[in-house]
Image (cartoon, rainbow, N blue to C red):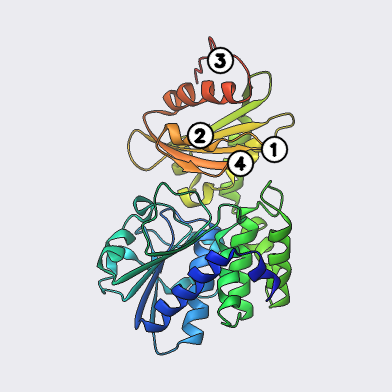
Amino acid sequence: MTSCCQSLSAEMQQECRRILELIEDASTIAISGHTSPDGDALGSVLGLGLALADRYPEKDVAFLLADRGCVPRIYKFMKGSERFVPAAEYEADPDLFIAVDCPVVERLADSARALARAKHVACFDHHPAREEFAERCVRSVSAAATAVLIDSFLRLSDIPLSSDVATCLLCGLMTDTGRFQYQNADPAAFACAARLVDAGAQPSLVALEVYQSQRLEYLKLESLVMGRIRTVANGRVAYSYAYASDLTRLHVTPDECDGLVDVVRSVQGVEVCLFVKETEVCHQVRGNLRSKCDLDVSGVAARFGGGGHTAAAGFTYEGSIVETLNDALPMLCELVGEDPTGLRVEL
């Protein structure tokens, strides 16, 4: 038994075998990640989808985007990214729907309709879930990324990993660990990365395309966000923000903003941070939370109907940026053990 399989429990290995049976019995397969997909969602869809398409050329494998938008620019380098189709335009009734990196049906957005039409549903995910929506699920909240679970599944199933598949999965792993800087960069994550590189993954390509090819317009927005950083709770909580008008004026698209929370996270002495930006929906704000220690920010996200991991979580708030900050920052102050009394933000 390979080391990647040893990282899966006996129960999860059995679930992998059952999912493989569903795959082998299916003629049409649809694979989707969550709405507003990140590198792990996209890399996991592509890694799994490309591997299945190569192994089973007779099957119709569809790569779905949960939204009507396109693949974010920084992820278009991955092989197969041009094969994504908006789920709203996918009309088939798949024999098998596979959700990746998604703990709840609501996060599948348009793809949820394809799931509802499917004969069978499977899931690979590393987020905690309120309840399982798939009949077969490989879920491990200790996995650094869903890409790690896809790698384990493919190897357990004796499905070869091409260099393109390995690069897609490595992109998922690198982005969800923040280039192996986050607390989830555990021995299993490094072992998976080593296996993927051995299979032909190109870490330098992922680093170049995702982290070292930013548009000048984005860098100007990053500078603006950096200049707005403020701290509260004796420097233990940091926050910053971006208006929709900032993105419009600087010609930056919303999908380019994923890395802005890490700008706020980088402040020395900060334990938890919050970055908020107005969405394209009127009077709606998206919040991103990060923790640099063992404090769990997912509980704060859950208070607003969001969720995520201990060190990284997000939520959507119906209101203004000021209202979001004034609701969320006191919770973060309490999280770090500071008194939020009298805390009011005025921008």
Q: Mark 2 points at which residue?
A: 299
Residue 34 appears in view = yes
Q: Could you tell me residue 279's position as x and y percent?
A: 40, 41
- At label 1, the amino acid type is Ser
C-alpha distance separating marks 3 and 2: 17 Å
Q: Give how far apart the Cα atoms at labels 4 and 1 are.
A: 14 Å
> How many dots with numbers?
4
Answer with the quarter of the image where residue 206 lies: bottom right
- Residue 334 sits in which quadrant? top right
Q: Is mark 4 on a helix, strand or loop?
A: loop
Mark closer to the observer (3, 2)? 2
How far separated are the C-alphas under marks 1 and 3? 23 Å
Mark 1 lies on residue: 266
> What residue is at 54 percent from the left and 63 percent from the top?
75
- Amino acid type assigned to the residue bearing label 4 in the image: Ala
Label 1 residue SS: loop
Tell me if label 4 and label 3 are in contact, CB under 8 Å.
Answer: no
Separation of marks 2 and 1 at Cα, in angstroms: 22 Å
Mark before the other along the chain sequence, 2 or 1: 1
Task: Give the Cα separation between the discs numbered 4 and 2.
Answer: 11 Å
State the residue in front, 79 or 248: 79
Sequence order check, earlier mark of 1 and 3 = 1
Q: Which amino acid does label 3 sit on?
A: Pro
Upstream in sequence: badge 4 or badge 2: 2
- Between the residue at mark 4 and the residue at mark 3, the CA separation in whole angstroms equals 21 Å
SS class, disc 2: helix
Marked residue nearer the N-terminal end (4 or 3): 4
Percent from the top left, x then y, of residue 166?
62, 73
Q: Residue at x 61, y 41 (%)?
A: 311
- Mark 4, residue position: 311
Give the mark toward the camera: 4 or 1.
Answer: 4
